[in-house]
Amino acid sequence: MSAGTGRAWVRPSSKNKDRPKSRHRWEVTYIDPLTGRKRTKGGFTKRHGDDKTTCAEAWKRDFLRRVDGGTYRPDEAGQITFEVAALEWLKTKQGLKKSVHNTYKSTITGQRSWVRQRFATAPIGNIRREDIQAFIAEMEQAGRSPQTIRNNYYVISQVMEEQVIRDRIPRNPCTGITLPRLVTYAERDDDGELHFLTRAEVATLASKLPDPFGLLVILTAYTGLRAGEVCGLELRDIDLRAGTLRVRREVVDVNGILTIDTPKSQRSRRIRPLPPFLVALLEPYITDHKRAARDWFAAHPELKYPGDDRLPLFIGTAAGRRGKNKATGEFDVIRWDYTKRLRHNAWYGREWRRAVRLARLSDAVVFHDLRHTHASWLREAGLQIEEISAALGHESVKTTMDIYVHFREERSLDNQRTALEGLYNEHATQQQGNVIQLRRKAK
């Protein structure tokens, strides 16, 4: 709101005639600068202490100051609750990816949402900067990651900024908040978070998984796809003749709801080469996969077969997913549902941890380490960081360098080693081939 000239008058309340003098009240009549209408603010008493000025005079001065300073807002504007305001804000966010929209909504209304528990019923006008800073501290003390804290803060800040634009509050209470510093992969604990597997370890890990999860692990390690990108693959994305795989979508799990969305960024839309051995593994699998899908849909005539091209490369499991093996009597047969996408978190919890233990790998190894492993293999093969960044579908080369900072360190060490070797050779040449002998200490 632009600054202007305020108009206000103080007068005794018209109801004072029915009250004793000790209970007299004052009221302020003023012109609302937002509507131009005359309004009244009543119920004021005298101040405590020696100050004989009425509270009405104090309110009038504050009102005129806010009007002249361009910060006036009607009292009721700030009484809308944060959740109502946040959902209004979400409606204005047109063109969001489904996954981003669902994440924002989950942050605002999710049952386990920190934002909902802390601010849902709070009037926006009552939320102060210290409340936001305390909220950040609470999440830190609870062990939430810096990125999670920042994501929650981002939503709150955007909602409150919208309220400033709507003239509901004078300023954004999220301004000047101290946020936890993001920790790079290179700074994380030694036990962790970033592991590189050998080709033999990947093969062993894959052998400990039931079909088709072993193939899924090998495919991920040799293509570097994200988990959501692997789950989003359809048969039309695989070109066995050309030996390529196209990344065009990803599956996102938000509070148990799977959505199909576009990749994270434009660079995530990419084509990955399939080595001949992987083509040889995929070919019979895809043939059997198509046959099994047709048989399954034939047994479920009420459901429509999407066609071979639209069939997910990896499908989800049915309710009561474990069936009884007639040969062994054990419940180790996986029941599939060809209408469902593979839910990464579900198979990861059931199968991955068990396979890691059977393969005698560190318990700290996670599925995303297959992507890190792929990057390390490409580096080992001599690819430049720009090529590795494109292969991984990172938004920028800087992202790749921030994650794989040791690649940069290795390159620097190689350059230094080469430079030092060159200096030594130059010195040796100047000495006409003399070799510098290192003295040994006398025993």
Image (cartoon, rainbow, N blue to C red):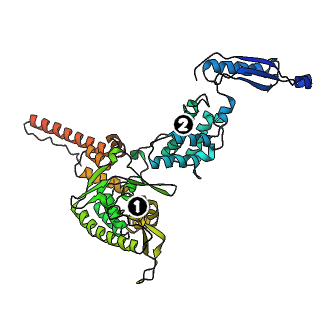
Q: Which residue is mark 2?
A: 157
In front of the other: label 2 or label 1?
2
Q: At label 2, which amino acid type do we have?
A: Ser
Classify residue 340 as left or right of residue 89: left
Residue nearest the observer in this picture, 404 or 326: 326
User: Which quarter of the picture shows residue 59?
Assistant: top right
- SS for dot 1: loop
Residue 329 makes an appearance in the image: yes
Q: At label 1, which amino acid type do we have?
A: Ser
Residue nearest the observer in this picture, 223 or 405: 223
User: Which quarter of the picture shows residue 352?
Assistant: bottom left
Q: Position of residue 274 (x, y in %)?
A: 25, 58
- SS for dot 2: helix
Rendered residue at 35%/71% (across/down): 294
Q: Residue furthest left?
A: 432
Vertical placement of residue 325 versus 84, above or below: below
Q: Badge 2: how crowded within 10 Å, few (<14), some, or many (20+)?
A: some
Vertical placement of residue 342 versus 130, above or below: below
Q: Which residue is mark 1?
A: 362
Vertical placement of residue 365 versus 35, above or below: below
Rendered residue at 28%/56% (across/down): 245
Q: Which of the numbered marks, if any, corresponds to residue 27?
A: none
Q: CA distance from mark 2 to mark 1?
A: 40 Å
Vertical placement of residue 131 versus 353, above or below: above
